[in-house]
């Protein structure tokens, strides 16, 4: 089949592209940067005939996706701003996230071949920071973070909180679109927590690492232990499988899935893994301790069962990523 992937040159998007290519599908990879797109294509010569790059300069206008959706059978919408380095949260995070989802769905509704759109939401759209233990509780795909739009975009709101708002309101816009417009396709939304793992997207320097992996590298390279805002995580390769299965399994239509490993993590645990798995680990790794917060849970079991995801271990994920990051550092 022929699938459009947005955010294709990002950390998660590139793994989704590879999972589709491996299964023999044709992929149209959308990016704002034709240069990054070309780099992706050059590094996948074996898939030259299956992979096409399309530049979408303005994600907020549905007209810009008109050509991108032409002739595709399905869409995986991964693109959304994920950075905490902002000056205007509404302009840089919240508005583009919502406008991007609306533009993609609007364009998809004009292309009759599109049967399904899978959207990368986030655990950020689920987390309720005021929900406190005891009693112990478990987040599921039924939960929504209670932020109001006004709170999300207030000038005193941090980028971390504004990002949570961006994911919530972008996902809500998708569900509203389907309810009101009744397009020929259905949607599936995926809510992953912190996503870690090896990278397959084009970046030149470790300094350009995506937001989540940058935290692992901070630990391994001896900076301070970052704050673990949640103890939940998933491997990017498992998440890519979830996206592709969500696209093709008929019974997944109309559902929201939490995609999360049953294991919990802390940056203290990252530290221990680096110390154990790497010869230099002990000398270089960040100082300090951090316990795993095991006081509440996130249930990713339904995605395991209904999307056939088998979650990797945290040790494997950290090891694979740090190995790769070290090689990149050596070559810089
Ligand atoms: P990256 O920053 O690596 O990728 C984000 C992608 O989105 C980029 O490829 C970029 O495309 C595109 N993008 C960013 N801002 C805009 C914008 N203003 N307009 C259009 N396109 C934009 O991050 P991830 O791969 O980690 O994130 C991908 C998705 O996964 C996001 O929706 C994020 O919210 C979600 N997510 C990530 C988690 C994580 O821990 N990494 C956890 C949970 C959810 P371009 O090629 O054009 O630059």
Image (cartoon, helix red, strand yellow):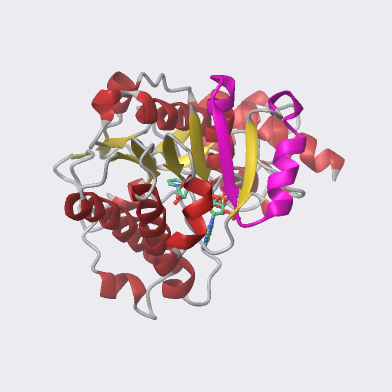
- Residue 128 in sight from this viewpoint: no
Residue 73 image offset from top left, x and y in percent: 42, 34
Residue 169 image offset from top left, x and y in percent: 30, 60
- The residue lying at 69 percent from left, 53 percent from top is 34
- The residue lying at 85 percent from left, 46 percent from top is 332
| Quarter of image, res 270 | top right
- The residue lying at 38 percent from left, 79 percent from top is 156
Q: Which of 24 and 161 is in front in this view?
A: 24
Residue 141 image offset from top left, x and y in percent: 23, 39
Residue 134 image offset from top left, x and y in percent: 16, 45
Name the side, left or right, on which 208 lies relative to 60.
right
Residue located farthest toward the bottom when viewing the structure as drawn:
155
Name the side, left or right, on which 85 lies relative to 256.
right
Number of marks present in the image shown: 0
Q: Which of 109 and 46 is in front in this view?
A: 109
Q: Does the magenta stretch include residue 282?
A: no
Q: Which of 330 and 257 is in front in this view?
A: 257
- Residue 172 in sight from this viewpoint: yes
The magenta-colored residue range is 20-47
- The residue lying at 51 percent from left, 63 percent from top is 84
| Quarter of image, res 201 | top right
Name the side, left or right, on which 175 lies relative to 73.
left
Q: Which of 24 and 133 is in front in this view?
A: 24
Question: In the image, is residue 6 above or below residue 243?
Answer: below
Residue located farthest toward the left when viewing the structure as drawn:
135
């Amino acid at each position: 089949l022929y699938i459009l992937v947005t955010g294709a040159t990002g950390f998660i998007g590139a793994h989704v592209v590879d999972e589709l290519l491996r299964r023999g599908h044709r992929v149209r990879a959308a990016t704002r940067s034709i240069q990054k797109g070309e780099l992706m294509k050059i590094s996948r010569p074996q898939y030259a005939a299956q992979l096409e790059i399309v530049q979408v300069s303005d994600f907020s206008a549905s007209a810009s996706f008109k050509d991108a959706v032409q002739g595709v059978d399905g869409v995986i919408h991964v693109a959304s701003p994920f950075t905490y380095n902002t000056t205007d949260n509404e302009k840089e995070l919240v508005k583009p996230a919502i406008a991007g989802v609306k533009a993609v769905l609007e364009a998809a509704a004009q292309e009759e071949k599109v049967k399904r759109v899978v959207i990368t939401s986030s655990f950020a759209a689920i987390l309720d920071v005021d929900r406190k233990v005891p009693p112990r509780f478990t987040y599921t795909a039924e939960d929504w973070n209670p932020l109001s739009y006004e709170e999300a975009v207030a000038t005193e709101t941090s980028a971390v909180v504004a990002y949570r708002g961006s994911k919530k309101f972008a996902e809500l816009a998708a569900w509203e679109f389907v309810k009101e417009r009744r397009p020929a396709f259905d949607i599936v939304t995926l809510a992953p927590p912190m996503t870690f793992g090896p990278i397959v997207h084009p970046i030149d320097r470790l300094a350009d690492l995506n937001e989540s992996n940058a935290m692992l590298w901070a630990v391994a390279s001896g900076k301070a232990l970052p704050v673990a805002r949640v103890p939940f995580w998933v491997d990017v390769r498992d998440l890519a499988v979830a996206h592709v299965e969500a696209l093709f399994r008929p019974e997944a239509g109309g559902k929201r899935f939490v995609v999360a490993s049953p294991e919990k993590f802390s940056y203290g645990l990252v530290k221990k893994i680096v110390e154990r798995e790497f010869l230099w680990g002990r000398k270089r790794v960040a100082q300090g301790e951090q316990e795993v917060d095991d006081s509440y849970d996130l249930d990713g079991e339904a995605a395991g069962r209904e999307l056939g995801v088998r979650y990797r271990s945290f040790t494997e994920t950290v090891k694979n990523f740090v190995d790769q990051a070290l090689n990149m550092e050596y070559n810089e």
